[in-house]
Image: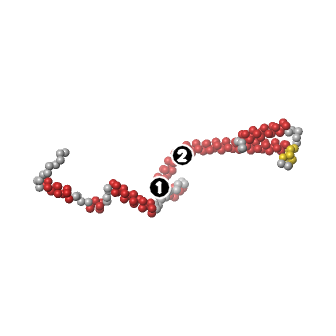
Amino acid sequence: MRKNSSAQIDDASKAIEAITKHLSKVKTVMLAGKTVATSDVAAALQARIDALRAAQSARGAWLAACSNEKAEQANSDVLLRNFFLTVKAMFDTQPDVLADFGIVPRKRATPTAQTKAAAVVKSTATRAARLTVGPKAKAKIKAPAASVNAKASESNGSSTPSAPK
């Protein structure tokens, strides 16, 4: 089981204290078939503690820097977004000037044949649903014959009783 760095520092500190307390008279120990001085073991433990503390402080500095960076982004985000929108509006037709600001103009996506076919089908369905027609089709529409006969009979004087309104 891996321990966090604080626990590792505590364990190494305890081991150094135990070496100086209990192994002060023992100069060497046999480790994995090799003779190692107890002072070398204590030095290795101290080096480990130093490395862990350096990593902790570096991590703390890194976390502080990340926090500062996030805060700065939040503060300047709206300002920079509005600035770049203004620059885009000012130099919309000059891509070389936009490139100087690091702005790449958006490219219009070219529709595929499948997208175009779907658009035609959708347009036709919409016109049919709304009963809309073009000017040529409107010109072909004539009034029904029944309404013409009704107007002619009214002008001749024959009156048919109409429904009360």
Could you say whether the residue bearing mark 2 is in a helix, strand or loop? helix
Q: Residue furthest bottom?
A: 113
- Mark 2, Cα crowd under 10 Å, few <14 / some 14-19 / many 20+, is few
Residue 86 visible here: yes
Q: Is residue 66 left or right of residue 104?
A: right
**Residue in the picture at 31% in, 59% down:** 134
Label disc, if present, on residue 29 of the rendered structure: none
Q: Nearer the viewer, residue 57 or 6?
A: 6
Q: Quadrant of the N terminus?
A: top right
Is 13 located above or below residue 160 in the figure?
Answer: above
Residue 128 position, x and y percent, is 34, 57
Question: In the image, residue 2 lies at what x, y percent?
Answer: 71, 44
- Quadrant of the rendered structure where residue 71 is? top right
- Of badges 1 and 2, nearer the viewer stands 2
Q: Residue at x 87, y 44 (%)?
A: 28
User: Which image quarter holds the C terminus?
Assistant: top left
Dot 1: element: loop
Q: State the scheme by which the image is colored.
A: secondary structure
> Of label 1 and label 2, which has the lower sequence position?
2
- Kindly identify which numbered label has been placed on residue 92: 1
Q: Seen in the image, is 59 located left or right of residue 20?
A: left
> In the displayed structure, would residue 16 be above or below residue 143?
above
The disc placed on residue 77 is 2
Is residue 71 rendered to the left or right of residue 121?
A: right
Q: Kindly identify the amino acid type of the residue bearing the numbered disc 2.
A: Asp
